[in-house]
Image (cartoon, rainbow, N blue to C red):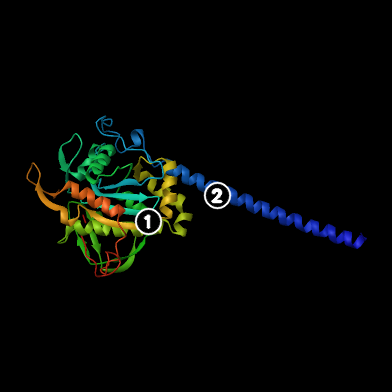
Amino acid sequence: MSPRKKRHAKAGKSKKKPLLWTLAIILLLIIGGAIYYFAEIYNQMDNLHKTGEDSPFAALPSPSADVIQPPKWEGTEPVNILLMGVDARGVKKGEVPRSDTMLVASLDPVKKKFYVFSILRDTYVPIPKHGKERINTAITHGPNTAMQTVSDLLGIPIQYYIYTDFQGFIKLVDAVGGIDYDVEKDMVYKTKADGPEYDIDLKKGFQHLDGSMALQYVRFRHDATSDFTRTERQRGFLKAVADKVISTTSIIKLPNILSQVTPYIDTNLDVNDMWKLATVGYDSSMGGSVQIPPMELLTEEKTSGGSAVIGISSEDKLKQFIQDTLTGPEPSPSPSASPGSSPSASAGSK
C-alpha cells in the first residue's frame, strides 16, 4: 500500500473512534436515564401501599377471620378493582370516612376490554358482620369488608382496592396538567357548613379544569336527578383522566405524577400486580360503563331509623345484569352524548 493510501486509511480509523465514543456515551446516558426513570416509578408505586401508622386503616381492628381475603390475581383471568374516593372533611384522626364515590373497574386481559360500574352510595346492602346499611359505610370497617360487600353485591370477585380522598383527586388532575372538558350546565352550590373552599361554581361550556374545578364537577349533585347523573358524570370524567394519564406526555412525566399522588392513595396492589395491570390496561379499550343498581332494578327502602335508601328488587337479576354487561357484545354508541361530551348532556354530586 502506498504511503498516501496508508495515511487515508489511518485518518478514516481516527474519524471513526470519536464517532463510536460519542455513540457509546449517548447509549450509556439513555440506559442510565431509563434505569433512573423506572427506578423512580418503582419506588413511587411501592409506596402506594401504606402499612403501620401510615395506613388510613391503622386504628381499625385487625381484619376479621370471617371476612374472606380477596383472591390472588394470576394475570390471565379478569380482574376487578374497587376504587373508593372519600370525603375526609371533619373526620377525626384515626376515623375512616364513608366513601363518597365507589366504582369497580373490571379488566379482561383476554378480550382487552375494561368495564366500569359506579355504585350508588345509598344502596342498602348487607355488610359482613355489621348488618344491613348503606354501602358507602362498608369502608369504615376496613378495605377487606368493603371488597367483600361489593363482591357479594355484584357476584364477582374483587381482588384489589384503591382508596383516596378529595386531595388525592385534586393532585392527580393537577399532576397531569388538568383536563379540557365540556361542562354540560351551570353548576352552583354554596354552603356555610362546608366552608368556601368546597363551594361549587362552574359555568357551562368547554373549558380547562384544574384539580379544584374538576372536584367541583364530579361532586355536584344538587339538581333533580342528584346521585344518578353524578355517577354518570364521574365515569365520563374519570375516563378523560385515564386517557390523559396514558398519553405520551403524561407517561414521560409519570414519576412526577406518582410522587404527587402517592401520599393520598392506599392500595393492596403490589408493584408486580401494578406492572401487569399497566401492561394489559394500556392495550385495552372501554367495553361498557353502567350504574349499579340499574334503573330497572331500583326500589325504595327504609333503614331501621326510617331514612330513605336505595333497594334492589332482585339480587339474582342484578348479578345476571353484571354478567351480561361483562360477556355481552359492546353497546352501540348512544345518539345522546354523555356528560362532558356535549352541552346537551344531563347532570348531578355532592
Q: Position of residue 163 (x, y in %)?
A: 31, 44
Residue 34 is labelled as: 2
Q: Position of residue 311 (x, y in %)?
A: 14, 49
Q: Position of residue 165 (x, y in %)?
A: 29, 47
Residue 14 is labelled as: none
Location of the C terminus (image quadrant): bottom left
Location of the N terminus (image quadrant): bottom right
Q: Is residue 213 visible?
A: no
Instruction: Provide the secondary structure element on which disc 2 rests.
Output: helix
Whether residues under marks 2 and 1 lie with C-beta atoms below 8 angstroms apart, the answer is no
Q: Is residue 138 above or below residue 186?
A: above
Q: Tell me the amino acid under the disc marked 1.
A: Ala
Extreme residue in the right direction: 2
Give the labeled residue for mark 1.
242
Asked which quadrant contains residue 226, the reply is bottom left
Q: Is residue 336 above or below residue 166?
A: below
Q: Residue at x 35, y 53 (%)?
A: 114
Residue 275 is left or right of residue 322, and the answer is: right
Sequence-wise first label, 2 or 1: 2
Q: CA distance from mark 2 to mark 1?
A: 23 Å
Q: Tell me the amino acid under the disc marked 2.
A: Ala
Q: Residue at x 48, y 55 (%)?
A: 252
Residue 13 is left or right of residue 250, and the answer is: right
